[in-house]
Amino acid sequence: MMRRCPLCNTSHPTLYHQDRRRDYYQCATCALVFVPAEQHLDAFQEKAEYDQHQNSPHDTGYRRFLGRLFDPLMAKLPQGAQGLDFGCGPGPTLSVMFEEAGFAMAVYDIFYAPNVDVLSRQYDFITATEVVEHLAMPGEVLNQLAEKLVPGGYLGVMTKRVSTPEAFARWHYINDPTHVCFFSETTFYWWAEKQGLSVEFPGNDTAIFKKH
């Protein structure tokens, strides 16, 4: 079977890790580690997993968690900036935090807020927290989000990053059956360069891209 990287579409990835449930391949071009499509959950199973998430804007612990992206991103935004929270989940919270800080927000989620109209607009900033690891076609989605940014706009991403094969083998993050793509700094640098973006890493699970 001819495998292709779901981020850059290069063929012939190499096996990176295997556990009892799944195989994990790594792309030689962009370094993305990914689970092959035939081992993904179907949409019904995937939504059943997300329905178990109990995130809410009233949960101070969850707000603190999101603060790891919210704080460094908000520090960059001009007054009146308009944003999109992409993949907001069943209990949108980051969008509420930005609204409380005076920013107009739209939300989109394929399962919980499937209003595709919001994807036809441009934004000063877009957030995707704990989203990219779930994407079957990350290249398509991330490129689309980059296109939705105005020049000078920001894309804030939160996802835990791949470090070494040894750490990957022991990593709790790969036990979630909805996690199918795993990014490293190398992968994010590669993608940013392809899109003409700059990238910085304010934390070990956050990345902020800027469109020039």
Image (cartoon, grey):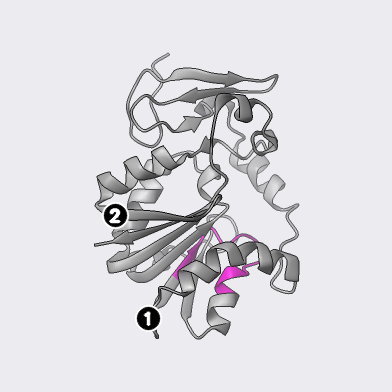
Give the residue type that dot 2 points to.
Leu
Relative side of 159 to 193, left or right: right
Q: Few, some or many C-alpha atoms within 10 Å of disc 1 (few <14, some 14-19, many ≥20)?
A: few
Label placed on residue 192 = none
Residue at the spot x=75%, y=52% of the render? Answer: 52
Labels 1 and 2: the sequence-earlier one: 1
Relative side of 66 to 86, left or right: right
Find residue 32 and report its horizontal and vertical position in percent: 44, 33
Label placed on residue 78 = 1
Examine the structure image and report whether residue 134 is included in the region drawn in magenta: no
Give the residue type that dot 1 points to.
Pro
Residue at the disc numbered 2: 197
Magenta range: 84-96
Query: Residue 117 sits in which quadrant?
Result: bottom left
Query: Residue 62 sits in which quadrant?
Result: bottom right
Q: Nearer the viewer, residue 87 or 75?
A: 75
Q: Few, some or many C-alpha atoms within 10 Å of disc 2 (few <14, some 14-19, many ≥20)?
A: many
Find residue 112 and report its horizontal and vertical position in percent: 60, 60
